[in-house]
Image: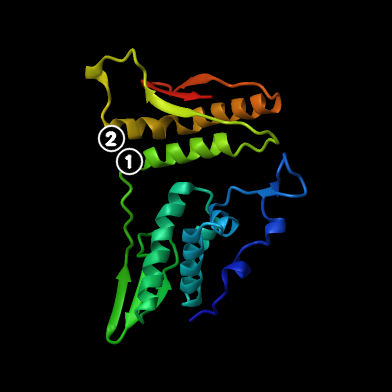
Amino acid sequence: MKACRPLAALLPAPAGEGVWSDAFPGVLRKTEREIYRWPANTHYDHLVDALAVLEAALAGGCEFGELLATRSRRQFVALTAEVLVAEDLIHRGFTVTTVPRTNEPTPDLRIAGDELDLAVEVYTPRELLAFDTWVAEVRNLVDQADVAADYVSGIETSIDPATPPDQHPDSWKIDEMLERAHDEVLAAIGADVDAQLRQLSTLNHVYENPGTPLRTRVG
C-alpha cells in the first residue's frame, strides 16, 4: 500500500492557490478548482462531513488526483461518488485502492478482503445534469461577482412566451439546449454583471440561448 497523505499535503497552500480577488486583494483569493469549495466553507456541517469522508478514504490508501485537480463541476460530482463508495467500504473493513486512469476502460476501485478481490465501477446517474449545472453556475456567476459592491440579484430562465404551447420542448430537450448554449450565454452574463457592478449601474437584461426558445433574465 502506498504511503497515505492527508488532504492538506496534497493541495497547494491556500496562499499559493489561484489568484488574488480583484475586490479584496491581499485578503481573499479565488480559484476555479472545485475541491476548495469544501475546506473554504466549513461553516456548513455537511461539508465538514464531506471532508472527513475524503480524509478517511485517503488515509485508507486511496488516491483521488482528478478530484483534487478538476475545475469541472460535472466531473467533481461524479468523482465525489467514488470517494463515498471507497470510504464506506473501508469503514466496513475492506482494503480499497483506486485504479489508475488509462486510455483504456478501467474500473474505479479495487476491493480486497477475505477470499475477495473485486473491481468496482462507480456509476453516477447524470440525467438532466445540465439543469443542475445551469442553475448552480448562473447563480454563482451573479451572486459571487468579484466586485466590492452590495447588491441584490434575480435570475429566471424560461421559454419565450411567443413560443406556441405545442412547440414547447420537453425536459430532455431543454437539458440538451442548456448544455449547448452554456459557455456562450454564461460568458455574456458574466461580462455584463462585472461591467455593470463596477459602474454601480443597474442590470436588467434578457439573454437568448442561441437556437433555442429559452431566455434567461438577469437583474
Q: Specify the amino acid type for callout 1.
A: Leu
Please report the residue visible at 56 percent of the width from the left and 34 percent of the height from the top: 142
Residue at left 51%, top 71%? 55
Q: Furthest residue to the right?
A: 26
Report which quarter residue 121 is drawn in: bottom left
Q: How is the image coloured?
A: rainbow
Q: Is residue 124 above or below residue 135?
A: below
Q: Residue at x 43, y 58 (%)?
A: 79
| Residue at (49, 39) in percent of width and height | 137
Label 1: which secondary element? loop
178 lies above or below 14: above
Badge 2: residue crowd in 10 Å (few <14, some 14–19, many ≥20)? few
- Please give left or right for residue 138 compared with residue 9 in the image: left
Based on the displayed image, in which of its 4 quarters is residue 21 positioned?
Answer: top right
Whether residues under marks 2 and 1 lie with C-beta atoms below 8 angstroms apart, the answer is yes
Give the side of residue 56 with respect to residue 197, left or right: left
Give the answer, above or below, for where 47 lies relative to 209: below
Q: 173 and 158: which one is in front? A: 158
Task: Give neighbour class at mark 1: few <14, some 14-19, many 20+ (Cα, 10 Å).
Answer: some
- The amino acid type found where label 2 is placed reads Trp
Q: Position of residue 129 (x, y in %)?
A: 36, 43
Disc number at residue 195? none
Which secondary structure lies at badge 2? helix
Tag 2 residue: 172
Sequence-wise, the earlier of marks 2 and 1 is 1
Q: Residue 183: horizontal and vertical position, in percent?
A: 50, 33
Left of 134 or right of it: where is 20? right
- The residue at which mark 1 appears reads as 128
> Residue 5 at x, y = what percent?
57, 74
Foreground pick, 188 / 218: 218
Determine whether, in the image, residue 5 is placed left or right of residue 29. left
Q: CA distance from mark 2 to mark 1?
A: 7 Å
